[in-house]
Image (cartoon, rainbow, N blue to C red):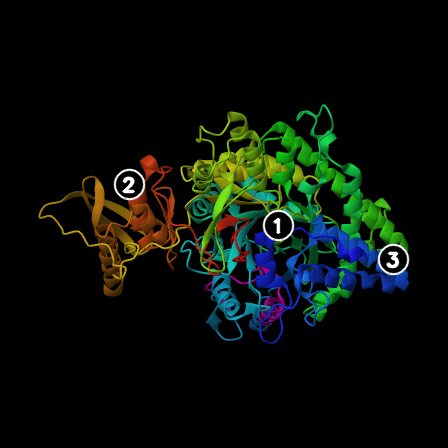
Amino acid sequence: MWYERDIELTDNALTVLKRRYLVRDGQDRVIETPRDLFLRVARFVADGDRLYDADDEAVDRTAATFFEAMASLDFLPNSPTLMNAGRPLGQLSACFVLPVGDSMEEIFEANKHSALIHKSGGGTGFSFSRLRPRNSTVASTNGVASGPVSFMRVYDASTEAVKQGGTRRGANMGILRVDHPDILEFIACKADTSEITNFNISVAVTDSFMSALNAGESYALIDPRTGEPFVRDGQEQRLSAVDVFDLIVRQAWNTGEPGIVFIDRMNRLNPTYPSETIEATNPCGEQPLPPYDSCNLGSINLGRFVRIPLPAGYVPTEPADGVDWDRLASTVRIGVHFLDNVIDLNNYPLSEIKAQSQKNRRIGLGVMGWADMLIALRLPYNSDAAVALADRVMAFIQSEGKKHSSELAKRRGRFPNWDNSIYAAEGVAMRNATVTTIAPTGTISIIAGCSSGIEPYYSLGYERNVLDGTRMLEMNPYFEKQAREAGWYSEALVRKVASRRTIRDLDEIPEEMRGLFLTAADVAPDDHIRMQAAFQRHCDSSVSKTINFPTSAGPDEVRQAFRAAYDQGCKGVTIYRDNSRPDQVLSPVKPAVGSTEPARAEAVAKRPTVLTGFTEKVQTGYGNLYVTVNTLENRPFEVFAHIGKSGYTTMADTEAICRLISLSLRSGIPVDQIVRQLRGIGGASQIFSNGARIFSIPDAIAQILERRFLSDAEGADHGEQPPEICPSCGSAMRFESGCYCCPSCGYSSC
């Protein structure tokens, strides 16, 4: 029978499947094999053909086609489909966008709906741009509004209480327009990385904002209730576009958030605009959606579409010669057919979502294994030829996908909202409003044994925790194969490669291989942007991609990347600077191996009798703040501050902050980690002073420490931070597309 074919899965894939995907009985025992899973999904989704008069024989042929695509690892649908197809829950979509209206009833209705979605295994995106700003009058209660950020915290707490479908944590995207009056508070709301942890956040940047930025001008804040310029105390409120952009840049440099979405571009390129307006995206940013819409995602494993062996005379300057275009076209058609069936068979969590999803029939066919394809074709990730191939491959997938969607429309009917789409004006029958999306593919790429999304390799080796507690070193299979065939493979080399993010400084590896096997740490931000832009040019929705920066990168480099993403036509951009998110600030000292002593804190240094330092005056919203920093061996040792003309509570709070800062400095905590914790903490009275926005007293102190002790080496490596540790298996995690994910067991923070 067709379902008896061999299925080759890596140990990692089997671990992920057993932990999260395979069916279990009432005693939590796995009672399904990977073959059973693919067969369950294939048969269930193929049944969708019956809605269009297919007989048993035709449905069986479709099931065989779907099974082969998945079992060969050429194509995999998103995780909810693998987990829930043919099972009682039946929720097959990965992502949804919910509207948040400006009334208490609407706000908490959306929160209730998001809890139901998280319970079913999906993620949610919200725009909080409709909410009135903080301190606005609420006529019905004679009170004042608490603002968008306060309700984000409510949603975050709710998400924390709901475990997603028993298999995944809840994940959210929070978006606020750059012209909302509370935009400054929003930008800084995750300056403390222990806050609002169930949200990724992005600023919705408008074309008019970018024009003001380029001209160095101010721009008007907009009252979300009226759509008119926002007035407070009789004055129209405006902000400097340069100052706001610099704040976004600074926060992203510090923590990786916020990201940016170019909201006007998203809407211009939305096939159902202007009848429908996009205001938010899913948690990883690749799926812009109007309210209540969803998208069903699936990805093609590009590494499996390289001709093996490569054609005689193949040279990397003509990489298209090495691509199996016919088989790729066939898999694109299978993917479109599969995802269109999912729309009909999905058990939607809300009736509003069902109506909207079936109205537009959006699907998101994307790719994974892109780095694998480049290695197989002997193309460095950052080469011009690789970018050109990305353009050609995605253009081909887009063309073939739309062609098949159009063929389905002739047999099954056009999507119901077709009359309000660009396709009506073009006279093109389409089954689906959108066809392509490039998702991050965290766990499904582990199942497929391939690189994730369109990212370069994160590293070429890593240490994996095995279930019995032992640890194993694992290598990238392409790299290991090359090393063994060329004769320079060794266990010592494996340990070296697994201990670092890059191999560029390992002289025992041939220079040609070091230039080919690039990792995210080797790829310049400009090359990340070029690659994202090449895929975006031929993608209906958006692209999930992280622009990686080394620890040494400065804010100016982040600023340039954001501008380049806009200039090159991207719909959004997310950056991450290595070590900008410390696992924890106060790390205990580990006892020696075999020791029975408990971990102990670092000793607090004694204060010398005499210290020298400086006092700096900074203006805050509470009055002039005088900050004294005493140093020892050119490093800050203690901090004192006095706030002039302020109340006793403010003075007491200021003294408490300084005592804790001093204790941290005397305990050996690096100043950059202290700055990370204090920078951007928001207060009720925020002002601009000396060209910078001062959010609060702790923020003012942090800015002085940063300017005095970090600015000369702002981009210097202040020491390796401990990696984020996977709570499921204890391995080191990696940060991609706004989420921490574990390459060992498949756990994801999103």
Residue 430 is a magenta residue: no
Q: Earlier in the sequence, mark 2 or mark 1?
A: 1
Asked if residue 281 is positioned above or below residue 152 in the image, the reply reads: above
For the residue pair 314 and 396, the one nearer the viewer reads as 314
**Mark 2 sits on what residue?**
709
For the residue pair 729 and 215, the one nearer the viewer reads as 729
Range shown magenta = 112-137
Q: Position of residue 250 (x, y in %)?
A: 43, 44
Q: Which label lies toward us, 2 or 3?
A: 3
Query: Residues under labels 2 and 1: Cα distance?
Result: 42 Å
For the residue pair 67 and 293, the one nearer the viewer reads as 67
**Mark 3 sits on what residue?**
412
Task: Report the residue at 76% width, 57% height from top.
Answer: 4
Is 88 left, or right, of 728 in this rendering? right
Q: Amino acid at mark 1?
A: Ser
Q: Are marks 3 and 1 in contact (CB under 8 Å)?
A: no
